[in-house]
Image (cartoon, grey):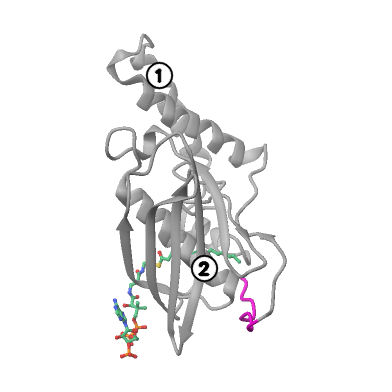
Amino acid sequence: MSEKPELVPGETRKLEVLTAIPKNEGVDSAVAATRRVISALLHAGDRTSAEMGAVAAQLNAIADHLDEHNGPVDDRLVDMWSGEGVTRHDPITGAENAIAPPLHLAGREDGSIGGVVTLGLPYQGPPGHVHGGVSAMLLDHVLGVSNAWAGTSGMTARLTLNYHRPTPLFQELEITGRQMKVEGRKIWTEGVISVDGEPCVSAEGLFINKQVPRPR
Ligand SMILES: CCCCCCCCCCCCCC(=O)SCCNC(=O)CCNC(=O)[C@H](O)C(C)(C)COP(=O)(O)OP(=O)(O)OC[C@H]1O[C@@H](n2cnc3c(N)ncnc32)[C@H](O)[C@@H]1OP(=O)(O)O
């Protein structure tokens, strides 16, 4: 993670992309295809006319092929953390992670960050709406990236969520975050998920300035 000096009052910073930009090739393109598969399977259920035995056989053949060609997971972990700056593997923004929606985030001149994302069936909780735990996951990450953008990062110690109204699937969600205060090792950060300018979920996080060492 690249550390940036803290903003001083009145200082502004240029807009900057804070998340991995997906490539239309390699593992990124396979991951994008996998996201389609995950959504299509949820869409299928028992109502589909597709032959699921054949689908399962094809998917298992793909998994076998990948397992045969992959190296040790310990090496992969080192590889994941060898770069500086944005991550490519996390479950929220990662271009290499099929679980990630993915959310793309940009740092803003005023010190906040934000991005938009539309969530489909894999993220459903209440009927037609986003699972509360998914909202918490998105906001925890956005608060974490807000801290990186502000220049002082840490581990989540406490995350407080307020669910104001159900968060809809299939509609564009705006997610924003901002570091509010740093005192010693304590960092306070806030974020919100909104639809059409109306807050659905807001979060307040306490982070402690401590890092887990990278694998080497
Ligand atoms: C540029 C863009 C780059 C982007 C890069 C990608 C970004 C990725 C973003 C990813 C984002 C995702 C992020 C993730 O997913 S982080 C993963 C989820 N979080 C964790 O796993 C954290 C687990 N917990 C710990 O490791 C420790 O407990 C921590 C590190 C939090 C503190 O243990 P440590 O031993 O270090 O601290 P301490 O005990 O001396 O306490 C220090 C002070 O803190 C106060 N305190 C502690 N806990 C709490 C609490 N719960 N409520 C209120 N207060 C609390 C405590 O009273 C004390 O205060 P005081 O007595 O001094 O006043």
| Other-residue count near label 2 (Cα within 10 Å), few / some / many at <14 / 14–19 / ≥20 | many
Q: Is residue 87 visible?
A: no
Tell me if residue 62 is in the magenta stretch: no
x and y percent of residue 77 in the render? 49, 59
Residue most toward the bottom? 184
Give the residue number, with chain letter if any, for mark 2. Answer: 178
x and y percent of residue 131 in the render? 31, 44
In which quadrant of the rendered image does the N terminus lie? bottom right
Residue in view at x 63 percent, y 69 percent: 110
Q: Is residue 26 visible?
A: yes
Residue most toward the right? 14
**Tally of marks:** 2
Highlighted range, magenta? 2-9
Depicted 71 relative to depicted 180: above or below: above
Residue in view at x 50 percent, y 73 percent: 179
Which disc, if any, is residue 55? 1
Residue in view at x 32 percent, y 61 percent: 161
